[in-house]
Image: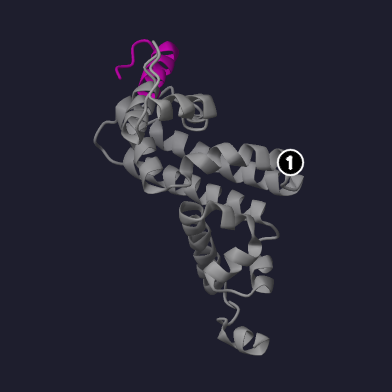
Amino acid sequence: MQKQRQLAMPPRAIHPEEKLRKRASILDAAQDLWTTHTDRLSSMDALAQASGVAKGTLYLYFRSKEEVLLALHERDMEQFFGRVIERAQQAEPMKAQDLSKLVIESIQNSPTFMPLAALCLGLMERHIPVELGVAFKLRITEQIDKAVLALRQHFPTISCETMMQCYALMLGLWQLIKQNPVHQHLVTQGIETNCKIPVTEEQFLQFLGNSLSTLLIGLLAQAHPEHSL
């Protein structure tokens, strides 16, 4: 039976292009598991089965489930910055609301975008080897630098610090509203408070988009009061 199972597995990727495709397919399976059976993603066995590779092959690409999650988060970020750069390179002027819209679209397109953004901060502190965490940080910083350079065509005073402040706002609102068990209890029980906190996913995304636009407008105006947003 074991021999038949091994024979049923696809051959290991040899060429660089095949390895990239195999890695991408593993991450696709991981994202699907996260969306449908989050608890199963805690097992490398389940991920190997879902991605259709032998467990030994899986470990050639990722040494732990934490590395899988970090890689999935990095892919989300790369896709986001790719969209930002693509939009910034267009001649049509951008406003703060346009950049906020790209954030909201990225959250809508990827179910792991915000959950892993919050989770991976803790992973890098406790479960990811320092050298991998440093390499990840350097790659993300490079992506931010490219995005900032492209965005300066529309926002001359935007900086890496501006992007970090926006990211902090995103994480803060996500953890405060979407991952707060007390807030979720209030929503479930239908208890209203004076602070009108978003209840539905649509309300949260609208609240987040408005908050990001307001922050961006304030930060950029503070850096360059004459610049129109």
Total numbered labels: 1
Asked if one can make out residue 95 in the rendered structure from this viewpoint, the answer is no
Say what amino acid the circle numbered 1 marks.
Arg
- The segment highlighted magenta reads 212-229
Which quadrant of the figure contains the C terminus?
Answer: top left
Report the residue at 71% width, 38% height from top.
125
Q: In this view, does 117 lie above or below 11?
A: above
Based on the displayed image, in which of its 4 quarters is residue 126 positioned? top right
Query: Residue lying furthest left in this view?
Result: 92
Q: In this view, does 29 lie above or below 195?
A: below
Q: State the residue in front, 65 or 139.
A: 65
Q: Position of residue 143 (x, y in %)?
A: 52, 42
The residue under label 1 is 126
Q: State the residue in front, 85 or 3.
A: 3
Report the residue at 58% width, 74% height from top.
53
Q: Position of residue 60 (x, y in %)?
A: 68, 68
Q: Position of residue 102 (x, y in %)?
A: 35, 38
